[in-house]
Image: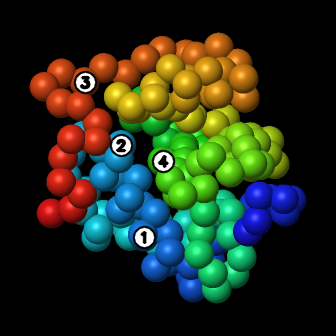
Amino acid sequence: MSDQEDLKIRLATVPDLDEIMKLAIAASGENSFLKASPARLAAEIWPALNLDHGLCGVIGKENGSIEGAVLLRIGTMWYSDSIVLEERAIFIDPVHRSAKGGRARKLCEFSKKVSDTLGIPLLIGVLSNARTQGKIKMYERQFGPQAGAFFLYGAATGTTPQTH
């Protein structure tokens, strides 16, 4: 997609699996604090591609490279039977981060629209040691004041091997 195109989010489908897995591995290398497991990543992504307790929104044309994605899963919190829409990851391919169009913002807007459409709350956040304040500010513009914080003891994001 060129910088000038109107960026649209589309639902990812099964043929997008390889491209989404590439993004997921890259996201894990940049943001994880534990070794990523391709099998566990696929176990979260595959159901969403089949609209089974979740979905995946992507920026990119069908049968082409994907510039960014959001993985949203529907489940419950450990303390409740009520369902919640949980963002597992928003990730923009580093090649497209400086391009015009606000890809991360558009994926946030997409996530809010899914939450509104389904009528269930969205749980979304930042767990990162890189560019954290900028990410938090962008999320606050999209979602309002933050509702807490994460802390890591004995670990930092982006410091582990990508996969095991």
| Residue 162 visible in rendering | yes
Q: What mark, if any, has residue 69 been given in the picture?
A: none
Mark in front: 2 vs 4: 2
Question: Marks 1/3: CA distance?
Answer: 26 Å
Amino acid type, callout 3: Leu
Question: Marks 2/3: CA distance?
Answer: 12 Å
Q: Is residue 120 left or right of residue 77?
A: right
In the picture shown, does residue 108 fall above or below 40?
above
In the picture shown, does residue 161 fall above or below 41?
above
Element class at badge 1: helix
Amino acid type, callout 2: Asn
Q: What mark, if any, has residue 21 been given in the picture?
A: 1
Say few, some or many: other residues with alpha carbon within 10 Å of mark 3 (under 14 / 14 to 19 / 20 or more): few
Question: Marks 4/3: CA distance?
Answer: 18 Å
Mark in front: 4 vs 3: 3
Mark in front: 4 vs 1: 1
Element class at badge 3: loop
**Mark 2 or mark 3: which comes first in sequence?**
2
Q: What mark, if any, has residue 31 been given in the picture?
A: 2
**Mark 1 or mark 3: which comes first in sequence?**
1
Q: Would you name the residue on which mark 3 appears?
A: 152
**Mark 4 or mark 3: which comes first in sequence?**
4
Compare residues 5 and 89 and report the one nearer the observer.
5
Question: Marks 2/4: CA distance?
Answer: 12 Å
- Relative image position of residue 121 (x, y in whole percent): 66, 35
- Relative image position of residue 76 (x, y in whole percent): 49, 42
Q: Would you name the residue on which mark 4 appears?
A: 88
In the picture shown, does residue 20 fall above or below 144?
below
* Residue at image coords 55%, 16%: 147
Image quadrant in which the C terminus is located: bottom left
